[in-house]
Image (cartoon, grey):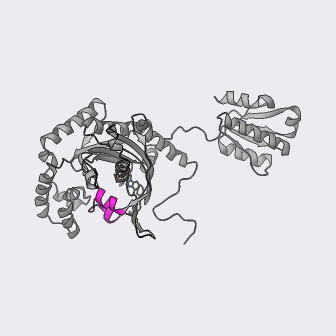
Amino acid sequence: MNTFQAPKGTYDLLPPDSAVYLAVREAISAPLRNSGYGYIETPGFENVELFARGVGESTDIVTKEMYTLTTKGGSELALRPEGTASVLRAALEANLHKAGNLPVKLWYSGSYYRYERPQKGRYRHFSQVGAEAIGAEDPALDAELIILADQAYRSLGLTGFRILLNSLGDKECRPVYREALQTFLRDLDLDDETRRRIEINPLRVLDDKRRDVQRQLTDAPKLRDYLCDACRVYHAEVRDLLTAAGVAYEDDERLVRGLDYYTRTTFEFVHDGLGAQSAVGGGGRYDGLSEMIGGPELPSVGWALGVDRTVLALEAEGITLQLPPATSVFAVPLGDEARRLLFGVVTELRRAGVAADFSFGAKGLKGAMKNANRSGARFTVVLGERDLAEGVAQVKDMESGEQKPVPLAALVADLTAKLT
Ligand code: AMP
């Protein structure tokens, strides 16, 4: 085994590419921060029971994909495979829902872990930015979240994504549909595992990607035909609000999503440039989840957008984000005295808010200039012995190549003025 190899299905984020990930997280969270969502951070692991009860004991996530461990003290923990159950657990634990200010709107950003078969866009460690609005049943809230995700993607310049929308019904109408679907599915020619799934979670059979399964599903009963009036009206309102906001969506009756807790509105953002792993984000309403994990009735809605896949979507669309340069000024001292003086200048520049870096280690002018070039700095300041004697530094504009002496006393002010 090569010791310098990240575990299978994982990868490291390294500069300069890592800057794109930071920018994506920032872009996805910006619309949330601007819409009343407060930041929440929960542990990277939880009691395994939370996910078993919350995500659903029949889901792939819980049965196959969870990283579980037993602590030395005998607790059964799981690395979090998703964010919603943890965020709801934290909100209930802190009684946020009792503060009299519903919905509780929260956003988060972090690492998630699923033991999946790795491929492009599917990793065992990945990154999501998510949002949850807890404790309100209001179609405007569902619409708000979809609109904010749309806004986030558009702010990155993405246009090649589509929004798939569906309603899964509620505790009144979904069981009736479930039974009709089970009756239909039991007559099909399916393998044993799929047969078992019919009894545990028949809606997920609709999600089966295999062609021979899909072919048999053409005449499956449609949830749309079973929605109760309340669900129908609710869904129509969500759709109207999206349309009024100019957000285009496609109705997708097959969209059931891989988690058990969804009710009513479900949606997925898919990007057509990503191949098999085309879902860049998804979410929906989970009115029953709080009760499933032992809390009070708290109808809620949320989404999670994948940072890794959003970066792949940017690549697929050939979008290069305009990121501020990591370094604006690079300082190159020649000699010990110049070194002390320029280090002070760099400190001052940084305190003035200018991104500045310094040529560290004993290097000749040539090596230092190479570093200056690589840093992407707009200006390089060179201070040689003769400059020092004359009380100036050479400021080189790395774009035009032009170089000018600037009095040392005016250096910080001069560079700050040039850069702001
Ligand atoms: P889900 O909770 O499965 O709907 O995931 C929400 C989003 O997280 C997906 O749309 C993906 O963008 C991302 N995601 C989920 N699983 C993975 C994975 N194994 N690797 C990379 N991204 C993932």
- Which quadrant of the rendered structure holds the N terminus? bottom right
- Which quadrant of the rendered structure holds the C terminus? top right
Q: How many marks?
A: 0
Residue at (47%, 44%) from the top-left corner? 25
Quadrant in the rendering for residue 70: bottom left
Q: Position of residue 56 (x, y in %)?
A: 28, 59
Residue 178 to residue 21: above or below = below
Residue 336: in magenta span: no
- Nearest the camera: 363 or 35? 35
Q: In this view, which residue lies farthest toward the bottom?
A: 1
Q: Position of residue 269 (x, y in %)?
A: 33, 45
Drawn side of residue 289 relative to residue 358, left or right: left
- Nearest the camera: 89 or 269? 89
Helix, strand or loop: magenta stretch: helix
Residue 398 visible, this orientation: no
Residue at (39%, 62%) from the top-left corner? 78
Residue at (25%, 40%) from the top-left corner? 137
- Nearest the camera: 172 or 156? 172
Q: Position of residue 138 (x, y in %)?
A: 25, 37
User: Which residues fall within the magenta stretch?
Assistant: 48-64
Residue 214 visible, this orientation: yes
Drawn side of residue 353 relative to residue 266, left or right: right
- Nearest the camera: 113 or 92? 92
Residue at (14%, 45%) from the top-left corner? 227
Drawn side of residue 42 relative to residue 270, left or right: right
Q: Position of residue 385 (x, y in %)?
A: 87, 40
